[in-house]
Amino acid sequence: MSFLDTINTIDDIPEGGDLPIGSITWMHGNKAGKTPGAFFGKATEFTGTPSAPWTHDDRFDDDPGYSAPALKIAFICWRSQWYMQDEGGPKIWLTHYQQGAKKQVEYIVLAEGCDDPLIMTLPKFTKAKPIQDIVKAYRDGLLRQASRVARRPLPLWSFWVPISGKVNKDGKPTYEEVLRGGASTGAYVTYPVATFPADAMDTLFVGETLLRKGGDVARTYGAWTEQRRLPNNTVEGEVLALPAPSGKNVPQEVSDEDLF
């Protein structure tokens, strides 16, 4: 009997906490290989085979997965934390910023082609900052305008945010030099950008079903937004995201302060 057939016959399994969520990230383009930037997740991060625009990706020979060069994403909530890491070593999580620390930013999202929510993990400044800028521009633009039109505060996940790698006028990937402290690092990356059509309010609205699903996800994983990893494997709470959803599974919009 298969695992799934067997597990479904057991009624008294001890609770294991919140259902774990798969993780995806943004992969910068490779200038030498002339490959575009894309969202990527290992095959083990998905509960099944994701549908279009995801396609099989074997860029890591020993750990295949799926990638999507362009993806519509509905952002639900987020958290961030500083860490230190030596080259090739493990991350040492910090409770506050220290000189030389890096910040990892994570979002729980609904993603096109996937039935289950995912965690978008952005472990570096060159990956996190562009996505943070996209989310802020969306909140201050489309979401704010739509809330005024609807005459009610709308939750963050009310609209799909279409994100893809930056391209030039010919549709080819663009590679921008990464600077650190104004100095060249020798690295060239393809940054993610969002493009909203003129009729975005109508064409990118997620609809009632996903609006309520996003509320369920926000409520279920509310504790996740408060968790901070510590070196001794304990957890310390810090609120970094949405307040608890209110009636009818439609949460209120986040405040303008402390977005990231």
Image: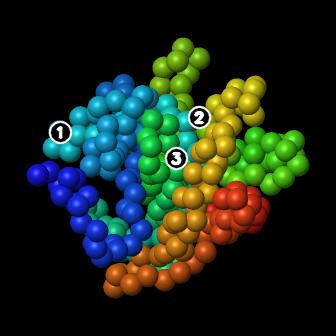
According to the picture, the residue beneath numbered tag 3 turns out to be 110
Q: Horizontal and vertical percent for residue 58? A: 23, 34
Decide if residue 42 is in sight here.
no
Identify the element where label 3 is drawn: strand
Q: Classify residue 37 by image quadrant.
A: top left
Label 3, residues with CA under 10 Å away: few <14, some 14-19, many ≥20: many
According to the picture, the residue beneath numbered tag 2 turns out to be 162
According to the picture, the residue beneath numbered tag 1 turns out to be 61
Q: Estimate the spatial distance between the alpha carbons at disc 1 and disc 3, rounded to whole Å.
A: 27 Å
Q: As drawn, is 44 to the left or to the right of 67? A: left
Q: Horizontal and vertical percent for residue 111? A: 50, 42
Q: Horizontal and vertical percent for residue 28? A: 42, 39
Q: Classify residue 256 by image quadrant.
A: bottom right
Among numbered discs 1 and 3, the one appearing first in the sequence: 1
Q: As drawn, is 82 to the left or to the right of 58? A: right
Quarter of the image with the C terminus is bottom right
Q: Residue at x 62, y 57 (%)?
A: 215
